[in-house]
Image (cartoon, rainbow, N blue to C red):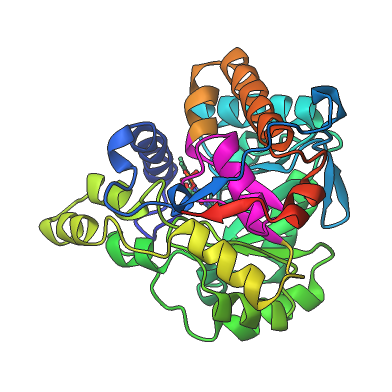
Amino acid sequence: MTSTSPNTDEAIKTRKADHLRICLDDKVQCKSITTGFEQYRFQHCCLPELALEDIQLSTTFLGKSLGAPLLISSMTGGTELAKTINQRLAIVAQEFKIAMGVGSQRVAVEHPQVADTFAVRSHAPDIPLFANLGAVQLNYGYNLDACRRSIDLLEADALILHLNPLQECIQSHGDTNFRNLFTQIGKLCQQLPVPVIVKEVGNGISAPLAIRLVDVGVAAIDVAGAGGTSWAKVEGERAEDIRQRRLGQTFSDWGLPTAECVASIFQANSKIPLIASGGLRNGLDAAKALALGADVAGMAYPFLQAAHESEAALHTLMEMLIAELETVLFCTGNATITDLQASQCLLQT
Ligand SMILES: Cc1cc2nc3c(=O)[nH]c(=O)nc-3n(C[C@H](O)[C@H](O)[C@H](O)COP(=O)(O)O)c2cc1C
């Protein structure tokens, strides 16, 4: 994500490096607000009438095939470390045929010399890759051309526009003019050659807002709800003054819990292509999100930690997530995610 602090090469690199360093620390995870997934449990089935190898995790999202209903949420780009992380993420996403987003490409639009830190298509030739820009940038000179360039850079299958009003309030010199964005997002949806996905960054999207976004042409919603990485805490950690620090603390647990967002959007319109993210930390969380109605489960922090360590650590994480998802399906007696969703085996405790 971005701020309007001086956009010199050095300032951008510092900001991107800060975000990676700070997000790797557990202290910017939400503490007193939770995702809400702990309020659900699956009904155990001790006679599944399946063999574990019968389980099929493959699915489709926005017309693209996935080996498992998983997304590496939008994170980074712009520095050498970000490039390494993006490349590792892309290699493992391709291996397991899951979807991947990159971080806000504003830095690459303004400084084309760092475009290569995002350009991972050669490592991930046939998975869905999602470009990323802040929707608010549409009020700060970004137009169709900037969006097209972000898509082209990645050879992306969709453009994610992120909504981050809380972060912009806390950042010094944040971009806080969110006027008239429904109309502008709607126009973009008409004009772009790929679908537009709208996401939050960890504070959630409500059902009424999701419906309005879909009404103007948005193809999918990623709730990015509360309970995981807190951008108020992240910006509080980067505080340049007492105001920023205080806002970061006050709003550190602000937002709509992820499970609540998913359940309410699915209940309002079960046809909206839906990504659940924000605080998902294992395959059991992902399975609960899918059972609540999400099509895909996204994670940022767990993938960041593993990617920072090594490609091997990422590979191991992916294997564990798959094993956890398969175990949920097996122990609820469901062979596919569609079966899981139809079985109503997720109970509220
Ligand atoms: C290091 C880092 C950088 C991020 N940068 C972006 C970004 O540029 N654009 C965006 O839409 N979301 C960004 N996010 C937010 C994530 O996509 C995600 O919505 C949020 O972290 C909540 O998921 P989590 O709890 O699994 O971390 C970033 C997250 C992390 C950890």
- Tell me how many marks there are: 0
Percent position of residue 56, x then y: 84, 35
Percent position of residue 235, x then y: 30, 51
Mark yes or no: residue 77 visible. no
The residue depicted at 57 percent of the width and 73 percent of the height is 138
Left or right of 224? Residue 287 is: right
Left or right of 205? Residue 194 is: right
The residue depicted at 63 percent of the width and 43 percent of the height is 287
Percent position of residue 190, x then y: 80, 78
The residue depicted at 32 percent of the width and 47 percent of the height is 234
Q: Is residue 222 above or below residue 40?
A: below
Q: Report the front residue among 325 and 147.
A: 325
Mark yes or no: residue 325 visible. yes
Which image quarter: residue 43? top right
Q: Report the front residue among 142 and 225.
A: 225
Which image quarter: residue 71? top right
The magenta stretch spans which residues? 274-301
Q: Is residue 103 above or below residue 6?
A: above
Percent position of residue 7, x then y: 42, 52
Report if residue 281 lies within the magenta region: yes
